[in-house]
Image: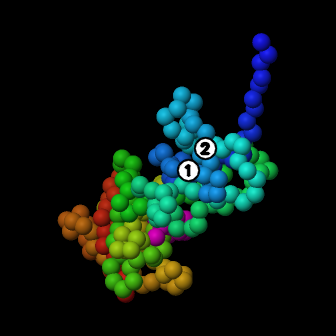
Amino acid sequence: MKLEWVSHRLSLAIRFIDHFSRQPVADELPVRLADSLLRPVLRAGGGGRRQDDGAYRFIGAPGGPARVLWRRPFARGHGPWMRWEPDPLLVLPLAEPAGLVDVELWPAAHAGAAPAATGVRGKLGGPQAGGQTVRIARAGQPFERYTRSDDSGNFLFLPASPLTLDASGRVPLLIEVRAPDDTPRVVAGGSVVPADAGSAFAGAAFTVLPRVVSRLLFQLA
């Protein structure tokens, strides 16, 4: 009996990365190509299409522009994940199809956080609080991460480690808020929820407890 070998050409390997942790998103996403609706290959043994390294791999994709979809039609996000920029558009074939293409996603305001994570589950108050760009950094350090508030002004932010403590055992942080046109917004102050978890503050500087995702209200002028 004559054996025939069938080979499959890898077209694309794409991976979705958590903007804050820089780690692959662990959730299975409905990844597909927009025009052909081609789906990634199944994991060995089945049970999903996200591979052990977090990548989704396509074989036999047609050449030309290919937009990679990762959320359901007409949805702004998928589960706890968000992305504000257009879905990634690639031109196939890639020069290095086996190279991983990383695409950032952001945890939504309602998303969970890793155990013992230090973070801020915040809400912007005041005029035009939705769709604002929010940056938070350690006091004296540059702003390296960002997110956006949802339509109600809510957001989740997980500052980069390491986070040094002040004399009271809290983490000193600074918040910056900008409008969609990049105009700076004035943060007049804020408060911690519940009130016994921390003191109210004036301006953009505040502190949070370490290894806790604190709830804070920020008032925009």
Residue 30 visible within the image: yes
Amino acid type, callout 1 = Val
Kindly identify the residue that appears in the image at 75 percent across and 39 percent down: 9
* Inter-mark Cα distance, 1 to 2: 7 Å
The residue that label 1 is drawn on is 31
Q: Give x and y (percent) for residue 158.
A: 43, 59
Kindly identify the residue that appears in the image at 72 percent across and 43 percent down: 60
The residue that label 2 is drawn on is 40
**Residue closer to the observer: 9 or 132:** 9
Q: Give x and y (percent) for residue 219.
A: 33, 80
> Could you classify mark 1 by the number of other residues whose Cα lies within 10 Å: few (under 14), some (14-19), or many (20 or more)?
many
Kindly identify the residue that appears in the image at 59 percent across and 66 percent down: 86
Q: The magenta stretch spans which residues?
A: 138-148
Q: Is residue 168 magenta?
A: no
**Residue closer to the observer: 138 or 220:** 220
Amino acid type, callout 2 = Pro
Tags 1 and 2 touching, CB below 8 Å: yes
- Say left or right for 70 vs 208: right
Question: Quick check: 176 above or below 14?
Answer: below
Residue 206 visible within the image: no
Name which of mark 1 and mark 2 comes first in the sequence: 1
Label 1's element?
Answer: loop
From the image, which quarter does the N terminus lie in? top right
Q: Which mark is residue 212?
A: none
Q: Give x and y (percent) for residue 123.
A: 34, 71
